[in-house]
Image: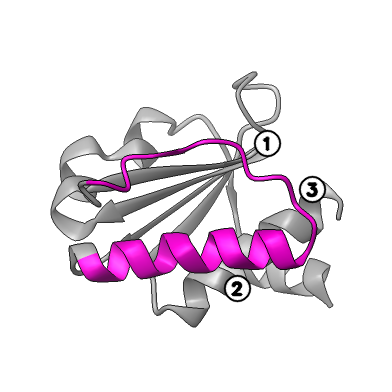
Amino acid sequence: MNVQETLAMAVKAIDDKNGHDVNTLDMSGISSTADYFVICHGNSETQVEAIVREIKDKAQENGIETGRIEGLESARWVLVDLKAVVVHVFHKDERTYYNLEKLWSDAPQIAMDRIVETKS
């Protein structure tokens, strides 16, 4: 899978587990860590865990190498490393506190319909 397909897969996995307020930031040229950040939240630790597991399962099904998964034990802010795509799954309370969208406000947001079009 290419980066765009990995991005679409992650967004679909989040949607499949009813993740909330999904934002995708184009980090190319801004961060050497990843090309894209996907940020979302769940309303409980259980939902955060379910979202992360769905991303991991879909990545494995599609042959996408999953790097580290950090924060799953507390399920308050979980980072899923899909190499060029890094997914941040927050508990809703933590998301407001850390406000990554503001921290990375210089990164362009990618419209969800562009991601879905890429997947088709």
106 with respect to 7 (left or right) = left
75 with respect to 115 (left or right) = left
Q: Which residue is mark 1?
A: 83
> In this view of the protein, which residue sits in the foreground, 50 or 88?
50
Do the numbered discs 1 and 2 sit on residues whose CB atoms are within 8 Å?
no
Q: Which residue is mark 2?
A: 12
Q: Which residue is mark 3?
A: 3
The type of residue carrying mark 2 is: Lys
The type of residue carrying mark 3 is: Val
Spatial CA span between label 2 and label 3: 14 Å
Query: Mark 1 or mark 3: which comes first in sequence?
Result: 3
Quarter placement of the N terminus: bottom right
- Secondary structure under badge 2? helix
Q: For the residue carrying disc 3, how many other residues have a C-alpha within 10 Å: few (<14), some (14-19), or many (20+)? A: some
Is residue 8 shown in magenta? no
Q: Quadrant of residue 116?
A: bottom right
Q: Residue at x 31, y 60 (%)?
A: 41
Spatial CA span between label 1 and label 2: 17 Å
The percent position of residue 95, horizontal first and vertical second, equals: 24, 48
Query: Mark 1 or mark 2: which comes first in sequence?
Result: 2
- Secondary structure under badge 3? helix
> In this view of the protein, which residue sits in the foreground, 95 or 16?
16
The percent position of residue 54, horizontal first and vertical second, equals: 51, 69
Do the numbered discs 2 and 3 sit on residues whose CB atoms are within 8 Å?
no
Is residue 53 shown in magenta? yes
Read off the magenta span.
46-73
Do the numbered discs 1 and 3 sit on residues whose CB atoms are within 8 Å?
no
Task: Report if residue 8 is visible in the image.
Answer: no
Q: For the residue carrying disc 2, how many other residues have a C-alpha within 10 Å: few (<14), some (14-19), or many (20+)? A: some
